[in-house]
Amino acid sequence: MATKTQILKGRQAVDAYREAHRLLHEKPYYKGIHDDHTPLLGKMLAGLKKQKFNSLQEFFDASNEQNLVDAKLVGKIDLTEAESLILEGMWK
């Protein structure tokens, strides 16, 4: 199981990718945009790998589990509407 520190550093890598991706797509479309995107994705995946995540899905599963821990909802089967709203407002 991933540590909270690994998850937080993974979230930083994903947030950095999201911001770089947003900035890339702020520009009008151009022929090489896909080539410019590849290094951004590679950098994010390398950051996740450094935190011992073998895939993006593995990271997001751990991050979602951390949200449940932080919201004190681990093991709860039926969430109330308020609890669902709390989770919805957490990092994704």
Image (spheres, rainbow, N blue to C red):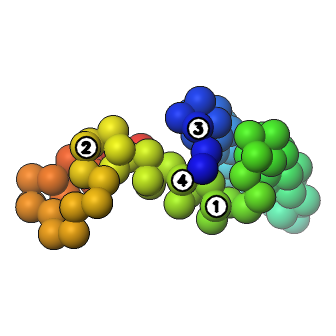
Q: Does label 3 or label 4 sit earlier along the sequence?
A: 3
Q: Residues within 10 Å of mark 4 (few under 14, many from 20)?
A: many
Numbered mark located on residue 62 in the image? 4
Residue 70: image x %, image y %?
A: 33, 39
Secondary structure of the residue carrying numbered label 4? helix
Q: Nearer the viewer, residue 21 or 47?
A: 47
Marks 2 and 3, how far apart at CA? 16 Å
Q: Nearer the viewer, residue 76 or 46?
A: 76
Is residue 65 rendered to the left or right of residue 60? left
Residue 41: image x %, image y %?
A: 79, 53
Numbered mark located on residue 58 in the image? 1
- Give, as a three-letter code, the residue at label 2: Lys
Question: Which is in the foreground here, disc 3 or disc 4?
Answer: 3
Which residue sits at x=25%, y=51%?
73
Relative to 50, say whether 74 is above or below: below
Image quadrant of residue 8? Answer: top right
Is there CB contact under 8 Å for labels 2 and 4? no
